Amino acid sequence: MQRKGIFRCLELLVAGPDNPGRFDMQAQVVQILGAADYPQEILRAAELLSAGKLVVLPTETVYGVAGVLNDPQAHAMLSELRHSSAARSFTVHVARPEAALQYLGEVNDFGRRAMRKLWPGPVGLIFDVPAERRRQVAKKLKVAEEDLYDGSSITLRCPGHPVFEDIAGQVDGPVVLISAGQSVHHAGDLTETILSRVEAVFDAGGTRFSKPSTLVRIKENSYEMERAGVYDERIIDRLLRTTILFICSGNTCRSPMAEAIAKKYLADRLSVLPDALEDRGVSVISAGSFAMPGAPAAPQAVEALKTMGLDLSRHRSQALSVELIQQADFIYAMTRNHARSVISLVPSSADKVSPLDPERDIEDPIGSDLPVYNQVADLLKKLIEKRLAQAVVP
């Protein structure tokens, strides 16, 4: 009965008033986010891939046809489905950033930074790999070198999608994705050709972005933009900075005060003006876990920092987001609940988020008089100077 229900779901997706008989295929569509047994469906997808079958998986940008490259059956079907104009090499998609190292060998500091700051996310990274390393990897994985490497380089993706991560993380071989068609952002957009060649479609709803992934070539201490997509060069520049993020609830009291104090401390340390910090590769930002975007700082917060020679009058609140968390190198939360909010949004951020005060929560002064705000400002200054002196900041 369950299998029939899945088939019926696919009928509804691909059939229409003009195509009543279109569905005569084997592919199953699984509404993965609403599955009664999510772990079991994830395991089934991994088993299909490991058995040499093709499945359609979601990423944050498109739906793609996935297969394990070193399985002969999957390799043959993937090669047949690819556009004839495509490069000979496939794009390997890894479940976690560290999984990329098996294809690369030694990675320079800038490359590691790019992997840490841009992954998981809608960015493909292109690395140059020495000839000996390319031969070793191809031999170990039992694939042709040109299937992985385009000349001396390899393109790798680490999609920011939990379904892809959960499935690919249980597959031993190299998982590659090829295009399921131009701008396939919903499972319902899949063509008959694709549906007739894959074993299953794991439908997670519409993709988060409607643009293609960005492609960035990693150099020794810099990068080249190969293709602008979800992120343009301006955003890549910002993401690759050293970023410090302060979190509170509304982003109108504690965290904007902390942001301004930290900017002044770091500017003094680097002998520049606070407005020139970003030119030195450092960004200090703040956000609120329950913030209403665009709200000014509390008047008492503005007054409390004015006595320190700092101006909060231009601050406007912003909400905590996945992008901000991924962008940050150091995240300081005003309370333990704020730290948990960060981790709940991005579980992989656990190693870079901590309470600003390791001993106790910094209570919200909202609604208090100016003397309370002055006390909070003084406490924030002491904590920030101590924490940032310990942090590895350029």
Image (cartoon, rainbow, N blue to C red):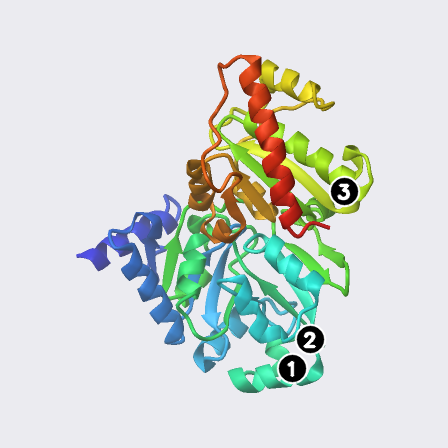
Q: Earlier in the sequence, mark 3 or mark 1?
A: 1
Q: Residue furthest left?
A: 1
Q: Which mark is residue 269?
A: 3
Work out whether residue 152 can be spotted: yes
Q: Residue at x 43, y 51 (%)?
A: 187
Q: Residue at x 46, y 48 (%)?
A: 186
Work out whether residue 213 can be spotted: no
In the foreground, 259 or 140: 259
Q: Nearer the viewer, mark 3 or mark 1?
A: 3
In three-dimensional space, the C-alpha distance between marks 1 and 2, rounded to whole angstroms, equals 7 Å
Q: Residue beneath label 2, please?
A: 129
Residue type (three-letter) at the residue carrying disc 1: Arg
Residue type (three-letter) at the residue carrying disc 3: Arg
Q: Which mark is residue 133?
A: 1
In three-dimensional space, the C-alpha distance between marks 3 and 1, rounded to whole angstroms, equals 42 Å
Q: Quadrant of the N terminus?
A: bottom left
Other-residue count near label 1 (Cα within 10 Å), few / some / many at <14 / 14–19 / ≥20? some
Q: Which mark is residue 160?
A: none
The picture places residue 183, in percent across and down from the top left corner, at: 55, 50
Would you say 168 lies left or right of 100 here?
left
